[in-house]
Amino acid sequence: MMEKQKGYVHVYTGDGKGKTTAALGVAIRAAGHGMKTYIAQFMKGMPYGELTTLARIPQITIQQYGGDCCIRKEEVTQSHIDQAKEGLRQAQAAMLSGDYDIVVLDEINVAVWFGLLSVSEVMPLFALRPAHLELILTGRRAPREFLDQADLITEAKSIRHYYDKGIQARKGIEY
C-alpha cells in the first residue's frame, strides 16, 4: 500500500474537448500506483466506452448518475435533479469512506449550470475532503466558487472542432 500524500483539488473546465479524458487519465495513472479512484459521472447515462475499460481495472469504480441524458437546460426534469442529488450523495460517501485516494465529479460543473445541483450543495465537499484525497471536478462553466477552491485549474480552449461542421459524437472518440 502506498503512503498517503497530500491531495489537491483540480478543476478541468472550458469549452474545449478533453476535460473528462484528463480526469480519466489521472485515474488510470493512479491505478498504476495502486491508488483507488471513485468516479461519479453526472448527466451521463449512455454506454460510454470508458465504462467497459474501467470495469476491468479493480482500483477504479465508476458510476453514472444521468440515465436519460439532457443536453439543454429546458429539458431538465425532476428525475435529472434526483439522479444528480443521488450522485452527489454517493460521491460524498465515497470521499468519506477512506476507501479512495481520488474522487472525480465528472460533469459536475454542467450539472450546477443546468440547475440539477446548486453551488451550495456541492461546496461542503471541499471542506469535508480528507487531506490525502485528490478531488477532481470537470465540465464547462465551472462556478467561480469552485475555481476559488481549486489548487489546479486547467481550461480546455476550443480552437477548432468538427462539431461546428455538423459532425456528431463518434463512438470511441467522444463517447
Image (cartoon, grey):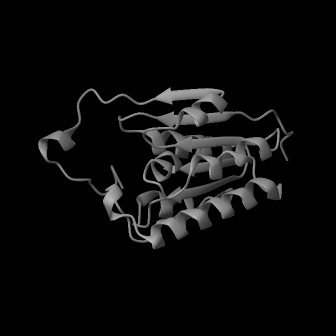
In the image, what residue occupies the spot 56% across and 35% down?
11
Horizontal and vertical percent position of residue 47: 41, 67
Is residue 55 found left or right of 77 in the rendered image? Answer: right
Rendered location of residue 24, percent (x, y): 53, 46
Name the quadrant containing residue 90: bottom right
- Count every numbered label the image shows and give the total: 0
Please tell me which residue is depicted at 53% across the width and 50% down the height of the picture. Answer: 108
Residue at 50% x, 38% y is 142
Return the residue nearer the eye: 74 or 86. 74
Q: Relative to 81, is 91 on the left or the right?
A: right
Front residue of 64 and 79: 79
Q: Position of residue 56 (x, y in %)?
A: 58, 63
For the C terminus, the quadrant is: bottom left
Q: Is residue 171 left or right of residue 44?
A: left
Work out whether residue 114 or residue 43 is closer to the camera in this orientation and state it. Answer: 114
| Above/below status of 77 relative to 2 | below
Residue situated furthest left in the rendering: 165
Q: Residue at x 85, y 47 (%)?
A: 1
- Taking depth in this image into account, of 41 and 58 the one nearest to the observer is 41
Residue 89: x and y in percent read: 67, 63
Q: Is residue 110 left or right of residue 170?
A: right
Q: Is residue 69 above or below residue 142?
A: below
